[in-house]
Amino acid sequence: MRRLVFLCAALVFVDTMLFAALTPLLPHFAHEFGLSKSRAGVLVAAYAGGALVAGLAGGITATRLGARRAVLIGLTLVGLASLGFAFAGNFWSLFAARLLQGGGSGFTWAGAFAWLLAAVPRERRGQMMGTAMGSATFGAMFGPVVGAAAALAGRSVVFSVLAATSVVLGVWALRIEPAPTEQPSLAAVRRALRNPTFVSGLVLMSLGSLLFGVLGVLAPLHLAAAGWGAAAIGGVWLIAAALETVQAPFAGRMSDRSGPLRPTRIALVGAAAASLALALGPRPAAYAPVIVVAALFYGVLFTTAFALLADGAEEVGLAQGMAFGLMNVAWAGGAVVGPAAGGAIAGATGDWIPFVLAAAVCGGVFGVLRRHGSGRRVHAKLGVPGA
């Protein structure tokens, strides 16, 4: 099991690293290709658009053909997309490469987590998923460091190496025993979408990706406007990444012991406060630490969402591969809306409004949790249909 945990951690690390590598490169592309904030948001959101399209396909593949095959398909797409990103020369070729990367993500995540859940005892589910999410968030925060390296050494070199990494991970996956296949069931999907535990996980997954999407577009552009270079911006995300490796397993253990509602409430309060602080747009000396704090609280929502999705799928008899295919769709929805809408609103009105709106959404979800949940309950109900 340990080898599988390490493999899944490596898979999601590389995947989210590629997703976030654009962060310090975004100001460079905005200058090179004359991108507006709105178009920059579209470029960031393209990755999530690919995941949205491929999310259900990845879940069906992981269920019918096996989790390992879904992982291999995802790695192939990610490797090809990395080569495309390495040699892209205009906005549309970058957009196409990002879209393909996101499509690969839809297969990789569904396969990796279905594979992991097939091997992990239920009582250790939160901790193991927290460990995997720690790797994912570390990848998301380490990605800007890779982007900064690409800005200094050249995209062709850095992203070609990342394409080769996909091959190495594929070989590693072939050396581990595959998980048994399952049969997809539309009836189980319908039951899951009426199950409050499962839908709560989808809501939190969408919210977390929306918040990170807004942060990933506006924060690097704010720092760049203040004169920070790609290396300095990447450094901020690296600090957050180091802290995330501790936070995610801790949140997972808290979820195992007292249910996911408690860490979710803490995260929502912290996320709202950090978003409001970012809306003030302070000088970089104060702005950069708030980015780190915001990322920590946003990341907790992913860990608790995973626990809710896995438990909800088990309650209704939904194959875990399909559960995480639906998770990809939920994540992608937030990751498309966050950067695209955040960039468009900021371009029209200023950066403060998207962050205020993000804080308001966090406050609204927290209010629903207070009305419909108990701190000792394992399953948090967000007042969705069927709750």
Image: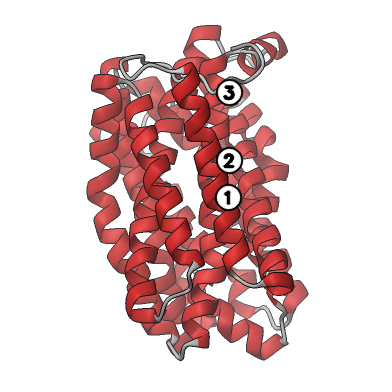
Q: Vertically, is 89 above or below 192?
A: below
Q: Quadrant of the C terminus?
A: top right
Q: Position of residue 223 (x, y in %)?
A: 46, 80
Q: Vertically, is 57 above or below 99?
A: above
Q: Which residue is mark 1?
A: 210
The residue depicted at 40 percent of the width and 21 percent of the height is 118
Q: Residues within 10 Å of mark 2 (few under 14, many from 20)?
A: many
Report the disc number at residue 63.
none
* Label 1: which secondary element: helix
Q: Is residue 44 left or right of residue 271?
A: right
Res. 364 visible in picture: yes
Res. 168 visible in picture: no
The residue depicted at 64 percent of the width and 89 percent of the height is 31
Amino acid under label 3?
Answer: Val
The reply to whether callout 2 and callout 1 are in contact (CB within 8 Å) is yes
Q: Which residue is mark 2?
A: 206
Give the number of marks.
Answer: 3
The residue depicted at 48 percent of the width and 69 percent of the height is 280
Q: Position of residue 322 (x, y in %)?
A: 60, 24
Q: Position of residue 49 (x, y in %)?
A: 70, 52
Q: Residues within 10 Å of mark 1 (few under 14, many from 20)?
A: many
In this view, the residue in front, 270 or 242, is: 270
